[in-house]
Structures are given as structure tokens and as C-alpha cells.
Image (tube, helix red, strand yellow):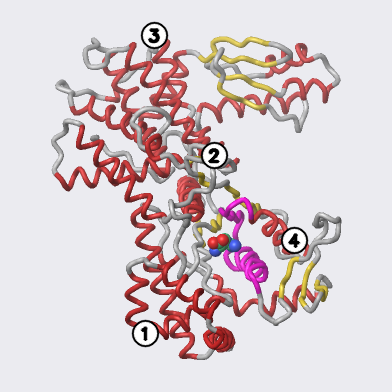
């Protein structure tokens, strides 16, 4: 089905087009009417006309079927109020539509680069943000009909691997595997680092090992593979705990691009973009300067002949465009890497690897802060482990459930606690503008009241419980939406706005556009539920209200699932 929003926007576009091609209306939900159309002022400017006259002209071209009232407001806004018949029709179609009005595109490919932890290093809260935001985007894109290719650009190459492999040998393979497989990645890394910094012989061995690794020495490769496999297995456990859709097959680490790096260099050279600077091979993309106004280099090959992070990302862009045929490439990575990506994109464009038709974006995000508003750290000043946070959230949820009178078994309660904990952690991340920092406050995140994941889960479960208490069956097909009560109408308009929220989240790459919508819908529902008895209402009102409940439950459940949050039926 076409959403109400799309129907109205389509009509407005035709009216605008009939007056002046290229003028674009903006339609948004409004408090005073049902929708408000903006853009008349721009149209008036284009035509050299007075805005109110232009509004009148738009109206004379506008298909007003289903519109009860139009009002020209202020300096040329059009306020549209819909008829109940039209809303009824739209809601009835919604009842039959599993997708709740969200359309599907086809033939578009999106490559989403997210999570990307580093081998033999703990996943920290920055990786949590990337994983949670990236996974929500992947789910939304998939639902919208895109073919999504997830790329987990794991850091599995570079000079640290010399010391990591030597440390592995010192510990003995079995011992090393044992320590890595329990997820003690950081102490393994720290052990290697400590020796590297204090023991010259170890340092020498490590250097030689890097050379062996780069030249493809088979035994060195085997040892390297152990580190990679153990780490990737550990990441998979974290992904399972978080319930994200990444799989081991999505791991395409930095090492994957090794064989492409020579070509990156020679092709940049052939394109006349490569400059030698201080022994390194660099590109100076236009428009990037340092604080002193000097051109800024993107280092492609270092003076020791090694390739770095930038070279790999150049190879990756190229691979994603020419081999994966991406229409969109998203990089869900922390804001501090902003300049790196801008420069990589600029060089890729200059080299002709990244056509303008491909949307390529750094989906940047801010920091996770502690209660003291500083970077989240443990008491001893270490970076906080992701799994630890989740475990704590599960414990809190379990405690909260224990206080409620429910007849869940121990196992059921634990399962539910997991679902709630994940919702709490993910929702807190997805409900703020991703560019902003947010404070990691478990007490607030896990609360059943307020703008939280558990609150939305609870709203959904409460709706489902209405249907469990149903003594006389109901038939959704007979629902007629008369919408006599304001609260019913308000809820109905909220339900019809779902496709718009999904599209807004995708267009801006901001999941909080969807979570904000869901929170608003839950509040509309609460208002409705307080004002309008459901089960005790007489027919046909009872069926109408049950249908509104059903649509609300489905919208919450589908919307949460697009954010990667489960909606249990009972809480
Ligand atoms: N491994 C990197 C880090 O931990 C993130 C990689 C992001 N993706 C990319 N294509 N550069 O900071």
C-alpha cells in the first residue's frame, strides 16, 4: 500500500508541478491540523507572486479527495485536515498490510561498514555504538528492500601483529588460545605490549615477525590466523549476547585488501595524484589543510614501504563500488575518524573510483560518557568492557522482574531479563542524535518509565495482554474507524505516520527518528487507553478500539525490531 503521507505528498507535488516544475513541497505532521504543507513561499518566490495567492493557486490544483478542510495559515502554510472516511480507509488497508505501509524499493545495494573491532583487543563502548547503530541501519535498509552487505572491517593487520604473534609463541599455543577464548583479549594484548616496551630482544623478534607476516611466511600466517580466529569467535559471542545480525561471514578484515594495495598505489600514480613527501607516498586531496594552512597528506604508503589504514580504506571503497556494486556505502565509525573518511572519499573521487551516483557517508557518532560526564572508564581507569555492561544490565533487569509479581520460571525470567537488558542498552544508544555524546546511566536506561527501551517493550506487552484477556472473539475485518474520540483520532494519525518515520530515519541515517516516533506513539496510546475503555465498550466501538490496539502493538513490535530490539508478548 502507499502510505497516507505518500498519497498526500504525491498530490501536492502534482499541484506544485502544475504551477512550476522543480518546486518541492514539504509535508509534515502538524499539531493544529493533520498535516501541514510548506514550500508555498518558495514557490511564490519562483513565480514572483504573493504567497497567499500562490497558496490559493495550489489549492485550485490540489486533489482534495479525503480532505475535510484546508486552511491557509501564516505566510503560506497549508493545513490539511483529513476526513474520517479517508482515515478509515487508510487504517483498514493498514490492518491488512504486514508492512504497515512501508514500501519496498528494489535493486539497490547498500554496503554498511560497522562494528569493526580489532583482533586481540577488547571491544569497547565505541564498538558498542558502531555495532548497535550499524545493525539498526542494516535492519531498516533490509526492510526497505535494499540488499544489505555488512562489512565488519576488523583490524587484523599491521605492526602490532609482530609482537602479538611472538607473545603467543612465548605463552605456548594452548595457553594463548585458552586466554583468548575466555575473552581475555586485553590482558593478552597488554602482556605483549609490556614485553615489547621493556625487552629489546622481544622487540627485535617482533619486528622480524612483521616482516615474515608481510612476506607471507606460512608458519607466521598460521599463527596469525589463530589470533584472528580466536578473536572473531569471541566477537561472535558478543554479537550473540547483543542479538545483532552480524555473522562471521561479514568479517572482511583489513588483511582482505592486502593484494589490492599495490594497484591502489600504481593507479593513483598513473592518475598523477601521488606525491612523495618525506619518503612516504601521499595524496594531497583538494580542500584539506592543517592548522597552518598547509595542504594535508593522506599517507598511502609509509616510508618503510608499509601500507596503512588509509591505503586499506581506499582499496575497500574501490572494492565496494566495483565488485559489490554498492549504491550506498555507510561507515558507522566514531566522529574522531571524520577527517580520515573525508580524505579517503575525496581521494577515491579524484581517482575516479567513487562516482557521484554512489552515496558514500561517514555515519559518525559521539562518545559514551560516565556519570561524571567524562569518557566512560572503570574505577581503575581502564576502558569499559562491553560484555560487562551487558551483564550488569541483565542483573538489574532480573532484579526488577523478581520484584514484580509474575509467574515466570527461573529460565523464563532470565530470558526476559536478557531481552530487557538488550533493549535498555540499545535503546539508550539509538534514542539520541547519534552525533551527540550520551551518558551511560543504567538506572535510567533500564527504567520501565520514561523514554526507554523497557518502557516501549512494556507498552507492547500491555497491549498484548488486552488480547489475552479477550473473552468474546473479535473480527478485525469488521472494524470501522469512526474515530469519535479525539484520542482515537490522535492515535490513528500516529499509526499512519509509521512509514514516514522509517523513511526519515533512513534519509538522515538517524535511528532516533524512528525511536522518537515509537515513544510518541506509545504516549498517544496511553492517552487513548486512559480516555477510551476497550474491552468494556459496546460494539461497534469495541472492535474499532481493539483494532487500534492491534495496530499499535504491531507498529511497536515492527518498529522495535527495525531497531534490533525484541518485543516480548509478556513482561
Ligand atoms: N578498527 C577500527 C577501529 O577500531 C574501525 C574501522 C572502521 N572501518 C573502516 N573501514 N575504517 O577504530
Question: Is 534 left, or right, of 59 in this rendering?
Answer: left
**Could you tell which of marks 2 and 4 lies nearer the N-terminus?**
4
Question: Is 50 left, or right, of 16 in this rendering?
Answer: right
Question: Badge 1 is on which residue?
Answer: 172
Quadrant for residue 180, please give it. Answer: bottom left
Front: mark 2 or 3: 2
Q: Kindly identify the residue that appears in the image at 28 percent across and 39 percent down.
A: 568
Count of residue discs = 4
Region in magenta: 308-336
Element type at marker 1? loop
Q: Residues within 10 Å of mark 1 (few under 14, many from 20)?
A: few
Residue 145 seen in the figure: no
Q: Kindly identify the residue that appears in the image at 52 percent across and 91 percent down.
A: 217
Question: Badge 4 is on which residue?
Answer: 349
Query: Ligand 1: which quarter?
Result: bottom right
Q: Residues within 10 Å of mark 4 (few under 14, many from 20)?
A: some
Q: Position of residue 383 (x, y in %)?
A: 47, 56
**Could you tell which of marks 1 and 2 lies nearer the N-terminus?**
1
Q: Residues within 10 Å of mark 2 (few under 14, many from 20)?
A: many
Q: Position of residue 223 (x, y in %)?
A: 44, 84
Residue 259 or 223: which is nearer the viewer?
223
Q: Position of residue 544 (x, y in %)?
A: 31, 17
How far apart marks 2 and 3 lie (CA) works out to 32 Å
Question: Badge 2 is on which residue?
Answer: 505
Question: Badge 3 is on which residue?
Answer: 484
Element type at marker 2? helix
Q: Is residue 268 magenta?
A: no
Amino acid at each position: 500500500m502507499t502510505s497516507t503521507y505518500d498519497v498526500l505528498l504525491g498530490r501536492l507535488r502534482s499541484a506544485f508541478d502544475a504551477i512550476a516544475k522543480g518546486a518541492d513541497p514539504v509535508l509534515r505532521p502538524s499539531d493544529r491540523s493533520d498535516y501541514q504543507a510548506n514550500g508555498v513561499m518558495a514557490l511564490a518566490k519562483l513565480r514572483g507572486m504573493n504567497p497567499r495567492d500562490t497558496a490559493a493557486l495550489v489549492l485550485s490544483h490540489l486533489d482534495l479527495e479525503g480532505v475535510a478542510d484546508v486552511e491557509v495559515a501564516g505566510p503560506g502554510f497549508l493545513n490539511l485536515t483529513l476526513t474520517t472516511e479517508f482515515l478509515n480507509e487508510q487504517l483498514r488497508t493498514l490492518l491488512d498490510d504486514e508492512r504497515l505501509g512501508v514500501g519496498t524499493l528494489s535493486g539497490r545495494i547498500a554496503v554498511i561498514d560497522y562494528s569493526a573491532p580489532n583482533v586481540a583487543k577488547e571491544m569497547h563502548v565505541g564498538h558498542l555504538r558502531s555495532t548497535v547503530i550499524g545493525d539498526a541501519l542494516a535492519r531498516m535498509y533490509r526492510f526497505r528492500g535494499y540488499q544489505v552487505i555488512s562489512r565488519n572491517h576488523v583490524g587484523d593487520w599491521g605492526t602490532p601483529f609482530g609482537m602479538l604473534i611472538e607473545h603467543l609463541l612465548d605463552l605456548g599455543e594452548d595457553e594463548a588460545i585458552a586466554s583468548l577464548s575466555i575473552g581475555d583479549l586485553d590482558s593478552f594484548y597488554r602482556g605483549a605490549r609490556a614485553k615489547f616496551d621493556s625487552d629489546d630482544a622481544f622487540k627485535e623478534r617482533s619486528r622480524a615477525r612483521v616482516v615474515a607476516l608481510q612476506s607471507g611466511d606460512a608458519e607466521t600466517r598460521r599463527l596469525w590466523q589463530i589470533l584472528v580466529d580466536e578473536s572473531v569467535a569471541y566477537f561472535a559471542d558478543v554479537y550473540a549476547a547483543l542479538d545483532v545480525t552480524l555473522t562471521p561471514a561479514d568479517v572482511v578484515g583489513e588483511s582482505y585488501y592486502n593484494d589490492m594495495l599495490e594497484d591502489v598505489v600504481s593507479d593513483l600514480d598513473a592518475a598523477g595524484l601521488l606525491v612523495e613527501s618525506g619518503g612516504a607516498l601521499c595524496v594531497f586531496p583538494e580542500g584539506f589543510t592543517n592548522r597552518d594552512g598547509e595542504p594535508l597528506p593522506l599517507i598511502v604508503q609509509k616510508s618503510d614501504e608499509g601500507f596503512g589504514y588509509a591505503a586499506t580504506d581506499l582499496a575497500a571503497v574501490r572494492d565496494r563500488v566495483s565488485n559489490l556494486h554498492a549504491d550506498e556505502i555507510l561507515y558507522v565509525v566514531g566522529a574522531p575518524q571524520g577527517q580520515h573518511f573525508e580524505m579517503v572519499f575525496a581521494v577515491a573521487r579524484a581517482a575516479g573510483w567513487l562516482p557521484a551516483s554512489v552515496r558514500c557517508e561517514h555515519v559518525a557518532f559521539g562518545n559514551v560518557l560516565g556519570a561524571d560526564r567524562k569518557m566512560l572508564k572503570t574505577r581503575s581507569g581502564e576502558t569499559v568492557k562491553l560484555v560487562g555492561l551487558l551483564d550488569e544490565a541483565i542483573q538489574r533487569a532480573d532484579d526488577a522482574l523478581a520484584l514484580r509479581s509474575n509467574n515466570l520460571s527461573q529460565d523464563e525470567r532470565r530470558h526476559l531479563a536478557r531481552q530487557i537488558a538488550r533493549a535498555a542498552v540499545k535503546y539508550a544508544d539509538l534514542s539520541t542524535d547519534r552525533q551527540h555524546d550520551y551518558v551511560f546511566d543504567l538506572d535510567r536506561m533500564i527504567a520501565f518509565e520514561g523514554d526507554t527501551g523497557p518502557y516501549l517493550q512494556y507498552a507492547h506487552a500491555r497491549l498484548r495482554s488486552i488480547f489475552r484477556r479477550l473473552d468474546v472473539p473479535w473480527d478485525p475485518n469488521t472494524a470501522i474507524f469512526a474515530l469519535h474520540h479525539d484520542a482515537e483520532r490522535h492515535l490513528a494519525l500516529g499509526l499512519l505516520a509509521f512509514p514516514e518515520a522509517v523513511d526519515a530515519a533512513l534519509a538522515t541515517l538517524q535511528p532516533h527518528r524512528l525511536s522518537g516516533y515509537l515513544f510518541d506513539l506509545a504516549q498517544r496510546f496511553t492517552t487513548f487507553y486512559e480516555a477510551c475503555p476497550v474491552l468494556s465498550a459496546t460494539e461497534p466501538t469495541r472492535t474499532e478500539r481493539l483494532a487500534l490496539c492491534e495496530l499499535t502493538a504491531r507498529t511497536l513490535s515492527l518498529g522495535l525490531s527495525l531497531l534490533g530490539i525484541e518485543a516480548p508478548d509478556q513482561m
